[in-house]
Image (cartoon, helix red, strand yellow):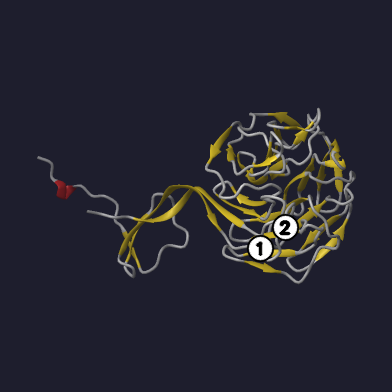
Amino acid sequence: MVAYTGIQGQNILIVSSDPSNPTEGQIWYNSTSNLLKGYAVANVNAWATGGNLNTARSAAESVGTQNAALIFGGQTPSPTGATESYNGTSWTTLPATMNTARESMGGAGNQTAALAFGGSNPPFTQTESWNGSIWTSVNSMNSGRYALGGCGTQTAALAFGGRDSPFTDNQLATESWNGTSWTSVNSLPTRKGHLGGAGIQTAAVAFGGYQPPSNTVSTITDNWNGTSWSSSGSMSTGRADPGSAGVQTAALAFGGLVPPGATQTAAAEQYNGTAWTNLPNMATARREIAGSGISTAALASGGQPGTAVTAATEEWTGQAVQVRTITTS
C-alpha cells in the first residue's frame, strides 16, 4: 500500500492580492477573493469592440501596444495630422498635431517615442519624430513615397516598398533609419505598394500589397534579415492595404482589399516566420486599417468599411498567458 502521507507536493502560496509578475504554471490562493488561481495559456482567439477614435479616419498609422497605442495622420477624407493615444479602453485627442498632415505613411516606435515617414499627398520624403508631447521634423527619406511598409523603433526603423505616383510605380526601395538619417539598403525582390509590414529593423516581414503586372493583389511574403530580403510562405488571402501588427516570427494581417473588384475583407491571419494560418474574421470588413500591438494582443483602428471612414476600434486577443480562476469539485 502506498503511504500517501509520505508524498509531498509543492505548497500553494497564499496571498492577499494576485502576484504582479507570475510565471507560467504558477498557482496561488487569493485570500481576499477566496479564489484559487493560476497563470496559464488561454486560447481566446477573438476580436472584441474597443473604444472609438475621436477622429474617424482611414490610412492612418498606429504604433505601440494594445493598452498603450498612438495613432496619427490619415484621411478624414482630407489629410489630417491629428494624433490620439489609447489606454486600453478609450482614445484621447492630444494637443499636438503632425507638422505635415498626411495619409498612407510608414511608422515605427511606441506611444511615447514614435517616427512617421513618407505619406501622401504628394509622395512625401518628410520624417517626423514624436517625443510623447510634440512632433519634430527630422532628416528626410531618400525616396519620397506613400502606401509603404514600416517597422522598428524611433531610433532604428525600416521603410520598404510603397508608391511614388498615383496608381503606378510600386517601389522596391528599402531604407534604414539610425535615429539621425536614412540609408538606402538592399531592395525588395518585387515592386509592391499598399503592403503590410511588421518586425524590427534587423528582422522584418513584408506581405500583401499591389504588384506588377496591372497592380495584381499579392500573396507574397518577404523576410528581412538586416541585410537582404528572401521570399517565404504565401498568404492565405492575397490583399492590399491590410492592417498589420507583431514581429517577423509572430505577425498579424487583417482586413484590406481583395479581388475581384477590390472588395473590403474581414479576413485575418497569423504568420509564424514561415507560414500563414487563418484566424477568426474581424467584426467589420474594412481597408486601410491602422494596426498596432503584438500577435496575441493587437489593435485594428479606423479604416474604410465602405465609402466613408470609420472611428471603430477592434481588439484582438489570441493565445496568451493569463491569470485564470481554478474551479474544483
Residue in the picture at 56% in, 54% down: 315
Residue in the picture at 75% in, 69% down: 133
The answer for how far apart the CA atoms under marks 2 and 1 are is 8 Å
Q: Mark 2 points at which residue?
A: 57
Q: In which quarter of the image is residue 94?
A: bottom right
Secondary element at tag 2:
loop
Q: Is residue 64 left or right of residue 146?
A: left
The circle on residue 159 is: none
> Percent from the top left, x then y, of residue 37?
35, 58
Residue in the picture at 52% in, 43% down: 280
- Specify the amino acid type for callout 2: Arg
Up the image or down, 135 lies above or below 283; here it is below
Q: Name the residue under label 1.
A: 53
**Counting other residues with Cα less than 10 Å from the Cα at mark 2, is it few (<14), some (14-19), or many (20 or more)?**
many
> Percent from the top left, x then y, of residue 83?
74, 64
Secondary element at tag 1:
loop
Contact (CB < 8 A) between labels 2 and 1? yes
Q: Name the foreground residue: 267 vs 232.
A: 267
Q: Name the foreground residue: 212 vs 293.
A: 212
- Specify the amino acid type for callout 1: Leu
Q: Is residue 240 left or right of residue 136?
A: left
Q: In this view, does 172 lie to the left or right of 289?
A: right
**Counting other residues with Cα less than 10 Å from the Cα at mark 1, is it few (<14), some (14-19), or many (20 or more)?**
many
Up the image or down, 258 lies above or below 59; here it is above
> Percent from the top left, x then y, of residue 87?
60, 65
Image quadrant occupied by the N terminus:
top left
Q: Quadrant of residue 278?
A: top right
